[in-house]
Amino acid sequence: MKEYWTSLASLLGVLAFCQSLLQVIFPPELRFACLKVSNRVFNLFSSYCYFDITEIDGVNTNELYNAVQLYLSSSVSTNGSRLSLTRALNSSAITFGLSNNDCIVDTFNGVSVVWEHVVTQRQAQTFSWRPLPEEKRGFTLRIRKRDKSLILDSYLDYVMEKANEIRRKNQDRLLYTNSRGGSLDSRGHPWESVPFKHPSTFDTLAMDPVKKREIMEDLKDFAKGQSFYQKTGRAWKRGYLLYGPPGTGKSSMIAAMANYLSYDIYDLELTEVHNNSELRKLLMKTSSKSIIVIEDIDCSINLTNRKKNNNNNTSTRNYYDPEMRCGSVPGPGEDGGNSITLSGLLNFTDGLWSCCGSERIFVFTTNHIEKLDSALLRCGRMDMHIFMSYCSYPALMILMKNYLGYDESDLDADVLKQLAEVVDKAEMTPADISEVLIKNRRCNPKAVSELLEALKTRANRNLLQNGILREKNSEDIMEDEEQEKRALESPPNEGSEFEEPCKKQEEEDEEKMK
């Protein structure tokens, strides 16, 4: 045993001597140079190349690192074996990420790349005005040399675009409104915001499924149409007009559009805007990927049809007249001193200033489309007109599913037949039907019976009103025909209101001559 330990000590001594000899013969500088040369030789014959993306570039945060981290979070949930979970500030979503020193394979246009998350300990820091993290983090991208041009030209831009999309979906959407009286908030912005939590989606929206699918496809084409709009020379924006009776779901439609595209909403209150210049400033302060909404456009300010103003006043007017500048002369206190013109609103939606941002949607709502000026309705301003009608049978089935959890198979065939026969005649809005279902949501059979009874009552009332209206119209028509008939049957000289005075005048003239 003693001999074993003696031989082991002798061996260790020889190794230490050889190491000291190597350090004398091959100093650190020479070893580093040899290692550098060997790496170059290896890279020369290797078919791969590597790119390092560090978390901190000098003293600034590397935005590409954050983008890669977000991009990989969309796919590692299924491909990675060991994951890290994160939740960003002001975000309601939990994202996945690569753990330390883990790898993942990604594919882009048929080309495979390897991402490795490298985490090492940072060396002792000298004095710095900005303390750095103890760990040094970064991603290493390994690609084949023949794919280098494709990756650098397209792949990294694709990663940045997908990261921005993920970031937008993870963040809470906001609902903005213009500050009262045009005042600015503490940051100097004219818009005030609150988190947008409206739960409406196209799945829960009570509307004909064919019409919903058409709207969704139009929205999707718009969101993905950047290259198309650039190629055709058009501003990347689109206008929607929602019109129909109150309670037909116009506000719910706007919320569903925002949730479908993950856009913020700017609810513009025109009565708080004093002039066209202030309207343009509000437009400039809106962000891209947003929906700008003006609800009840026919009730906000006086923007009636210009032909009416021209017919009512035939006198000559010039630019300095208030009616020419404001669209119409407001009465005392009307519109609160608002001087927005129809021209200013048209330029807001389709003028040069409307192109100061990209990927924005304008939505106007009204209960009376006939009150709007035709210039506001043309394509380019309101590209798609969406009629929000009374509740139809397919929309009724969506409401039954939302509030009662009933499908068509859960209802009796006779009840379905009665609902289908009466729903169009009743002309009830989705809001009215929803109220009936909400009142009786604790008992589904009672809710169905109450709804059927309400639909029949409304249908009978509409039928009675239509009958009275038709009868009244027919009586008016008959009376007009009788008057025309009497006028035609009477002799031409009878009933002349000028005949009697003329005879009296002739008699007086004859007496004077005598």
Image (spheres, grey):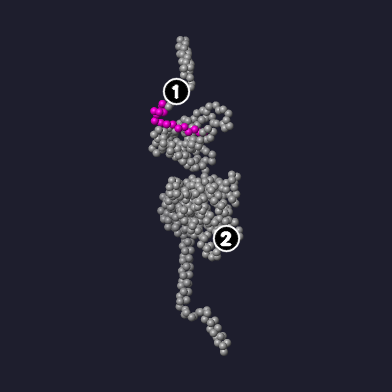
Q: Which mark is residue 358?
A: none
Relative to the observer, which residue lies in front, 3 or 204? Answer: 3
Q: Amino acid at mark 2?
A: Asp
Span of residues in magenta: 41-56
Q: Residue at coordinates 51% horizontally, 48% vertically from top-left?
A: 356
Residue 254 percent across, percent down from the top left: 49, 50
Q: Which residue is mark 2?
A: 321
Residue 254, above or below 94:
below
Q: Is residue 55 magenta?
A: yes
Residue 117, above or below 170:
above
Q: Which residue is mark 1?
A: 34
Q: Residue at coordinates 52% horizontally, 60% vertically from top-left?
A: 306
Task: State the SS at label 2.
Answer: loop
Residue lying furthest top in this view? 3
Residue lying furthest bottom in this view? 514
Earlier along the polypeptide chain: callout 2 or callout 1? 1
Q: Residue at coordinates 52% horizontally, 64% vertically from top-left?
A: 311
Task: State the SS at label 1.
Answer: helix
Q: Amino acid at mark 1?
A: Cys
Relative to the observer, which residue lies in front, 59 or 93? Answer: 59
Q: Residues within 10 Å of mark 1 (few under 14, many from 20)?
A: few
Residue 229 percent across, percent down from the top left: 44, 48
Residue 19 visible in image: no
Residue 409 visible in image: yes
Residue 351 percent across, percent down from the top left: 50, 52
How far separated are the C-alphas under marks 2 and 1? Answer: 88 Å
Residue 12 percent across, percent down from the top left: 47, 14
